[in-house]
Image (tube, rainbow, N blue to C red):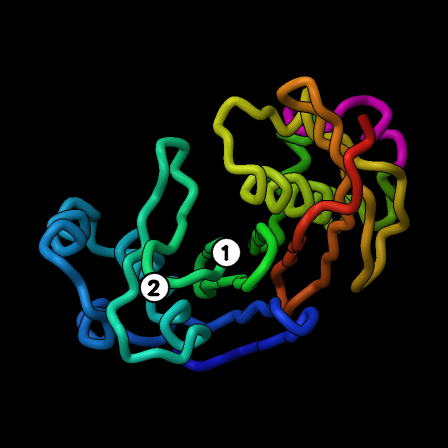
Amino acid sequence: MALAYYKHLDGTSAFGVWKIEESAEELYSQLQLKEDEKAYIETLNNGKRNLHWLSTRVLLRKMLNTHKYIDCQVDEHGKPYLVNFPHHISLSHSFDYAAVIISEDKPVGIDIELVKTKIERVAGKFLVDEELNFINPEKKIEHLYICWCAKEAVYKLQGKKTVSFRDNIRLQQFACQEEGSLTAILEADQECTSFDVHYEAFKDYMIGYVTGCKELVY
């Protein structure tokens, strides 16, 4: 597995993207796993699901730069967290790449997606009319993927399955660029929170990420 991209976001946060080139056996050999983790891997079909799970854990180990066992668990909503390290984490994967974001002092979220035209067919399921209206028709696919990755990053940061992309996460109008940021508003649990979400194109993929919240609106 080769480090394809690494970015320091601030003094306590960073994310990395790795190209998955090893076999499952090669990735497996780089991890310290307990019996329950080994049993979980056995339930995964050979192929991308297996490679994605293994590669995000290998990348996490590289980013934490440790030889210690990393106790990475998931909560009742499926959000990953570390038991024996203080860092907040978020994991993502798409086809041939894995992405991990870590922070020492704030919740984080990341999403990486291979850009494909099929997103047009489902745009109305994750965007409301006000959001669809600001999509640039000349860059429609890329603009839609920025929206998806931004909402996914916020969804992963807040970590609750009950949150809906379309109904609870709203994006303020923004221009579609190769790299930029936008404001996302999360309305959930009788609170309204604002986030600065960043995005950037990476090869044939789109990456969206967020660290902490900007403000509690009400």
Residue picked out by circle 2: 57
Task: Say the numbered circle drawn on residue 135.
Answer: none
Say which residue appears at 35% left-offset and 58% top-offset.
52
Question: What's under tag 1, amino acid-wise?
Answer: His
Residue 167 horizontal/vertical position (percent): 68, 20
Depth check: 84 or 183 in front? 84
Q: Main secondary structure of the magenta part?
A: helix
**Residue 33 within the segment the image draws in magenta:** no
Quadrant in the picture for the N terminus: bottom left
Quadrant in the picture for the C terminus: top right
Mark 1 / mark 2, whichever is N-terminal = 2
Q: Is residue 200 above or below residue 74?
A: below
Residue picked out by circle 1: 88
Secondary structure type for disc 2: helix
Say which residue appears at 18% left-offset and 71% top-offset.
25
Question: What's under tag 2, amino acid-wise?
Answer: Arg
Q: Is residue 133 above or below residue 137?
A: above
Depth check: 73 or 44 in front? 73
Q: Nearer the viewer, mark 1 or mark 2?
A: 1
Say which residue appears at 61% left-offset and 46% top-offset.
153
Per the rendered image, the range of residues in magenta is: 125-134
